[in-house]
Amino acid sequence: MNMLRNVELVMKVQDKLLNPIAKEYDLALQELKIMIFLKNSRECDIAQNIVKSLGLTKSHVSMSIASLEQKGYLEKTQDHSDKKKYHLKLTERSQDAVKAGLDVQKRIKKIMMEGITPNELQVLADVTKKMLDNLEKYSQQKGEK
């Protein structure tokens, strides 16, 4: 079982399906992914969350945010308690592109779940949770990062 290869395949299919949407809305693929992330994770609305969750560099996220803001897809508002933080909010202009991106995610999920029974899905969820718990424990060990 090559889980990393499986993740890469999902990402490859996602990119293939998202690329035409990004082009249609004059977006870089990464910009569209950031917009979809913000829609899916409303409580994670700062750049640092995007960096951690999507595995992107700070500089790429900063450039994408600036581009999205300039194109009118995103607004930044300064945090009241921490002046270094900015909250990111999708604008009305972003809604069609984001909806198309979310539809792609639903399509991929439907493709992946074809022929899988509820019992098989539960086993997968249980095993995946154990694996992620193991990785979490390992990453928290002293000297292991």
Image (cartoon, rainbow, N blue to C red):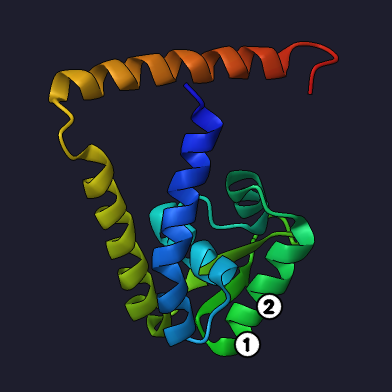
Question: Is residue 53 positioned above or below 134 on the image?
Answer: below
User: Helix, strand, or loop for circle 2?
Assistant: helix
Outermost residue to the right: 143
Q: Position of residue 140 (x, y in %)?
A: 71, 16
Question: Residue visible at 44% across and 79% down?
Answer: 91
Q: Residues within 10 Å of mark 1 (few under 14, many from 20)?
A: few
Q: Quadrant of the C terminus?
A: top right
Q: Position of residue 72 (x, y in %)?
A: 53, 87
Q: Quadrant of residue 64?
A: bottom right
Question: Residue visible at 65% across and 47% down?
Answer: 55
Q: Position of residue 44 (x, y in %)?
A: 52, 51
What's the amino acid at mark 2? Ala
Q: Residues within 10 Å of mark 2 (few under 14, many from 20)?
A: some
Mark yes or no: residue 24 visible.
yes
Asked whether, in this view, residue 114 is left or right of residue 82, the answer is left
Find disc 2 in the rendering and name its residue: 66
Asked whether, in this view, residue 12 is left or right of residue 140, the answer is left
Find disc 1 in the rendering and name its residue: 70
The answer to whether mark 1 and mark 2 are in CB contact below 8 A is yes
- Distance between mark 1 and mark 2 Cα atoms: 6 Å
Question: Residue visible at 42% across and 55% down?
Answer: 13
What's the amino acid at mark 1? Gln
Residue 4 image label: none
Asked whether, in this view, residue 42 is left or right of residue 68, the answer is left
Q: Quadrant of residue 104?
A: bottom left
Mark yes or no: residue 42 visible.
no
User: Helix, strand, or loop for circle 1?
Assistant: helix
Q: Quadrant of residue 4?
A: top right
Question: Residue visible at 42% across and 68% down?
Answer: 18
Question: Is residue 137 positioned above or below 103 on the image?
Answer: above
Residue closer to the observer: 74 or 28: 28
Q: Number of callouts in the render?
A: 2
